[in-house]
Image (tube, rainbow, N blue to C red):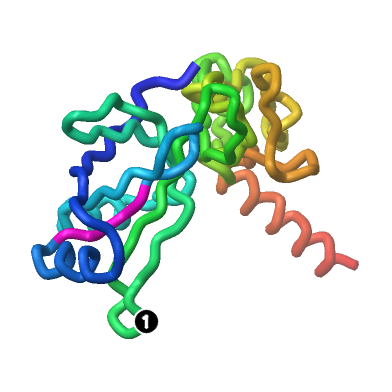
């Protein structure tokens, strides 16, 4: 199940329409709207610097947030759009959608590797090369895995670890419809260099 869902703090925005939105921007606030979930739309606003920091953190459009608005019950939301100034590229409006526990969404879930100390390939000098530190999954909002776990025990040098090795929670599936690579265990550089030298020597003898 999901670990701690990050908070997204907003305040109720008084008034709607372009005039109210312009007033919010003059007060260094970014207007937004929360819709869906069987409830009425809720006009909100975000402190400008706070929202910029959230956007710079990355994955804003694919992160499940716990929306906190004073006077309102906390609700899970996902961003469905950030409008930006066409010249400066700065945010001018945010659209958030409420999620029911049964809603399906795409989220990036981190990958954790365990038992590195008993991995045959790593003990013999191999290197774990992580291709995807996180994987985008289609999940049910009420059943989000906190992480995906890959057991390295028994893996050898040259092994490729794919998504098929991970047992996903029921109802969860990758957004990519193929058996893609998550990591591999490559040979030590010294061994690779020795193999290259051996190949060059063989070619020279020939």
Please identify the quarter of the rendering in which residue 92 is found.
bottom left
Lateral position of residue 54 relative to residue 177, left or right: left
Q: What residue appears at the point 67 percent right and 33 percent down from the top-left corner?
A: 157
Please identify the quarter of the rendering in which residue 204 is found.
bottom right
Q: For residue 113, say whether it is visible.
A: no
Q: Position of residue 189 (x, y in %)?
A: 56, 48
Please identify the quarter of the rendering in which residue 72 is found.
top left
Q: Nearer the viewer, residue 204 or 145?
A: 145
Q: Residues within 10 Å of mark 1 (few under 14, many from 20)?
A: few
Q: For residue 85, say whether it is visible.
A: yes
Q: Position of residue 73 (x, y in %)?
A: 28, 25
Q: Is residue 32 magenta?
A: yes
Q: Nearer the viewer, residue 169 or 166?
A: 169
Q: Where are the magenta residues, as a range?
A: 29-33
Q: Relative to 28, is 143 above or below?
A: above
Q: Nearer the viewer, residue 62 or 126?
A: 62
Q: Relative to 82, is 141 above or below?
A: above
| Pointer 1 residue | 86
Tag 1 secondary structure = loop
Q: Is residue 169 magenta?
A: no
Q: Position of residue 67 (x, y in %)?
A: 31, 35
Q: What residue appears at the point 23 percent right and 60 percent down from the top-left corner?
A: 30
Q: Residue furthest bottom?
A: 87
């Amino acid at each position: 199940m999901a670990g701690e869902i990050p908070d997204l703090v907003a305040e109720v925005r008084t008034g709607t329409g372009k005039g109210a939105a312009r007033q919010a921007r003059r007060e260094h606030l970014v207007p937004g709207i929360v819709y869906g979930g069987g409830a009425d739309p809720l006009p909100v606003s975000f402190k400008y610097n706070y929202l910029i920091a959230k956007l710079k953190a990355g994955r804003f459009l694919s992160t499940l947030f716990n929306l906190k608005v004073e006077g309102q019950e906390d609700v899970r939301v996902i961003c469905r759009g950030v409008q930006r100034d066409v010249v400066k590229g700065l945010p001018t409006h945010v659209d958030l959608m409420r999620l029911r526990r049964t809603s399906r969404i795409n989220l990036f879930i981190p990958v954790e590797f365990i038992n590195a100390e008993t991995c045959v390939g790593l003990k013999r000098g191999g290197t774990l090369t992580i291709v995807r530190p996180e994987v985008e999954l289609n999940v049910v909002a009420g059943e989000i895995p906190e992480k995906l776990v890959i057991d390295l025990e028994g893996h050898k040098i040259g092994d490729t670890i794919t998504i098929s090795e991970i047992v996903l929670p029921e109802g969860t599936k990758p957004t990519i419809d193929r058996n893609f690579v998550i990591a591999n265990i490559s040979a030590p550089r010294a061994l690779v260099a020795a193999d290259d030298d051996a190949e060059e020597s063989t070619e020279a003898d020939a």
